[in-house]
Image: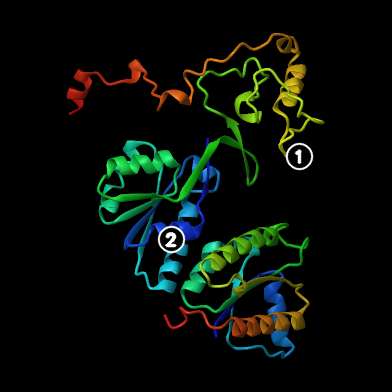
Amino acid sequence: MKIIGYVCSHAGYPAADLAGELGLHYSPEVVLVRLPCLGRLDVLHLLKDFRQGTDAVFIAGCLEGNCHHHYGNFEARKRIDQAKGILDSLGLDGKRIELFHVASNQGPRFKEIADIMVERARQIGPNPLGGA
Amino acid sequence: MIIGEQKPLKEICSMLEGHKRILVAGCRSCVAICLAGGEKEVGVLSESLRLHSDLNGKGWEVLELTTERQCEKEWVAEIKDLVAECDAVVSIACGVGAQTIQAMYPTVRVLPGLNTSNMGAPEEPGVFIEKCGGCGDCVLHLTGGICPIVRCAKSMLNGPCGGSQNGMCEIGQETPCAWDQIYRSLKQLGRLDLLERPIPPKNWVPSRSGGPRKIVRPEAMMTKEEKEARE
């Protein structure tokens, strides 16, 4: 399985960092991509990921109303919904993408998110383009 | 500006059956503003088509391009080389743009990726409302700058009708009554007197009933001598 996690610099990444410092283990199948803010996330990023065989993508950023850049996570939500719709219409299952909100001091929650997405990817099954 | 919205992805994919090398052509004008066919949307649609192709073994090669204005021959002429490499063009400009490409490149199949809807304006981010019916005989000077032809569900020239309730139209609670808006606008302008004069039956000759309309501006046309000089 290949799972990509987009994390913002102000909450998602510090939470992942804290999970590491706490010695919390999550699957090595999860690869993190650090963004300055979830507002930087683009539908194209997500579509390209799946075209390159990614099985699931999660996006972890600031809690709602607590975005360091005020509304980056709200922007991201709209783009994620758009990408989910595209995956659904292509028969790839929009549930392969999920947005999570996390605070920088929630290391255990970050591990939980990674576990949820690994489990979800296994349930949905591998991306047919995974071998590409 | 012209408002359009993208066709469902499945419909676009089914139109492309049998084609191999596909150009997705957008336009940086109206459809970019209404977030339906600009550079950004070209990128997303192209990637979606590639994903569909990979998932279903279609073997499509999808190219991308966004012209400055797809409705003008001068801009469309610039994409000649790219169009020549393709066997289909998905135009996500308005219907005018798609027709311009087809007219200039008659041997390549041009497919509409958008449903062109109306002439309107952005009301707020992501919301676009029809504002002009293009009737060819404007009466905005009599109606406080609000078009009764397209903003009134019945296109009434002397409204409102009995379906106007609390400023809203009977067709739906989200649709303001155009004649209520006209009244408020004329009141603000201090020209309620205009409401006392019935608007006479409108001249519909310049509207759509006479086939495709053509506007000629002699001062802008090239004379035979000019054409020869340019050649």
| SS at circle 2 | helix
**Residue shown at 34%/69% (left/top)?**
B59
Q: Is residue B45 above or below residue B215?
A: below
Considering only vertical position in the picture, is A86 above or below B138?
Answer: below
In the figure, is residue A127 to the left or right of B131? left
> How dense is the environment of label 1, judged by Cα within 10 Å: few (below 14), some, or many (20 and up)?
few
Give B223 or A123, whichever is nearer the viewer.
A123
In which quadrant will I find the C terminus of chain B? Answer: top left
Query: At which x and y percent is residue A58?
Result: 63, 74
Which sits in the foreground, A79 or A88? A88
Can residue A30 be seen here?
yes
For this orientation, the residue located farthest to the front is: B162
Do pointers 2 and 1 mark residues of a single chain?
yes
Compute the Cα span from label 2 to label 1. 36 Å
Rendered image: mark on residue B13 = 2
The quarter of the picture where residue B133 lies is top right
| Label 2: how many Cα within 10 Å (few below 14, some 14–19, many 20+) | some
Q: Earlier in the sequence, mark 2 or mark 1?
A: 2
Is B41 positioned to the left or the right of B179 in the image?
Answer: left
Name the residue located 68 percent from the left edge and 10 percent from the top edge: B198
Horizontal side, residue A54 vs residue B162: left or right:
left
Chain for numbered disc 2: B
Label 1 SS: loop
Q: Position of residue A16 (x, y in %)?
A: 69, 80
